[in-house]
Amino acid sequence: MTVIQRKPHNPIAHLSAADIEALAAELDAIRDRVIASRGERDAAYIRRVIGTQRKLELGSRVVLLFSLFPPAWVVGTAGLAVAKILENMEIGHNVLHGQWDWMRDPKIHSTTWEWDHVSPAEQWKQSHNELHHKYTNVVGRDNDLGYGIMRVDEDQPWHPMHLGQPLWNLLNACFFEYGIAAYDLELGRHLKEKTTKDRVFRTRLRAVGRKIRRQVLKDYVVHPLLSGPSFLSTLAATFTANLVRNVWSHSVIMCGHFPNGVETFEKTSIEGETKGEWYLRQMLGSANISGGRLLHLMAGNLSHQIEHHLFPDLPSNRYQEIAPDVRKIFDRYGLSYTTGSLPRQVASAWWKVIRLSLPNRSAVRRPVDDRPLDDRPAAMSEPSLVG
């Protein structure tokens, strides 16, 4: 990896190529240990979570049949929001990563699972599993980094339109599943390049349209109609539950990729990247959220974003177990393990969104280069990061 380094201290300058490969060997050993020990305990965990989520969703929808009564509305809405969060975060996201494929259960398999989300599972797997996890925090390659609508680093040229990015981010949070579907489609690129009539794009767009229709029909027509006189209150409850789910998911993901301490990388940084350098990029480009078991469950264990990016296909219930060993590797190799409470990480991520919506301050340690990132010269030896 090559580096353009703004900070006075390069966080990996002390590591030699041999150090990086030794680090990779230690991480490989953790992965091998977990794979060798997967078994009934893990299978029972995911089946229990799925069973709990389904019962919670069914019970909440039954309560919402009586949502004209305020207590029923509150209980039903809260239960439905939690059920939707569990389905998206701990179940859907992780099943679609293939974390449970080893069970060979066709009902809990990445090739058959379809989630409660407007983005079709197959499209999400391509943009998330194949692109985001391959190009983690690489500016211009990782769509999850700023979702293609925000300035994410001081080295990116500032334009007046960036003043609106706190608002774009808020709207993206509220309607997050639709934002995900849009950049799974690479809608912005196709609109910019005027390729919306491309056959492949049109096929993918129709798939998204069908999924949106199914979701809208289920959430905003069928279930409210089943409530009879409680139609409008159930409609409002479902919209509220989806809003809560979207804001929560957006917050957790922002905390894993955007708070202070998380590095971003240039496109040229991954040319000739070794496995050890890929591991290192995941370590530097991710952040965790500290908390208890309930928070980890509701976050889909993406509160262990560092561990997830290192081992995206390991069962999510193992991340908390291996986190202490991963942190010891950070310490042993002199790397910063970025973590903090949920309020702290959310505030840090939002502050970065706001700060980068404004022009660079004159106090930035080196002049801003307005040339595209790929057109600038890079150093020849250090791992590449743009702070």
Image: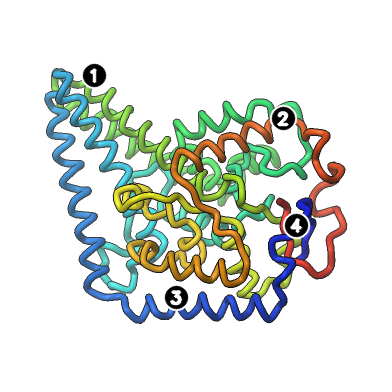
* In this rendering, the label closer to the viewer, 3 or 4: 4
Q: Which residue is mark 3?
A: 31
**Mark 3 to mark 1 CA distance (whole Å):** 50 Å
In the picture, the disc for residue 358 is 2
What residue is rendered at 61% in x and 50% in y? 261
Q: Which residue is mark 4?
A: 9
- Residue 369 lies left or right of residue 36; in this view the side is right
Q: Against 260, is 71 above or below?
A: above
Q: Amino acid at mark 2?
A: Leu
SS label for mark 2: loop
Q: Position of residue 104 (x, y in %)?
A: 28, 73
Q: Position of residue 348 (x, y in %)?
A: 56, 39
**Is the Cβ of the residue at disc 3 closer than 8 Å to that at disc 1?**
no
**Mark 1 to mark 2 CA distance (whole Å):** 42 Å
What residue is rendered at 43% in x and 80% in y? 32
Q: Which residue is mark 1?
A: 232
For the question of whether residue 89 can be seen, the reply is: no
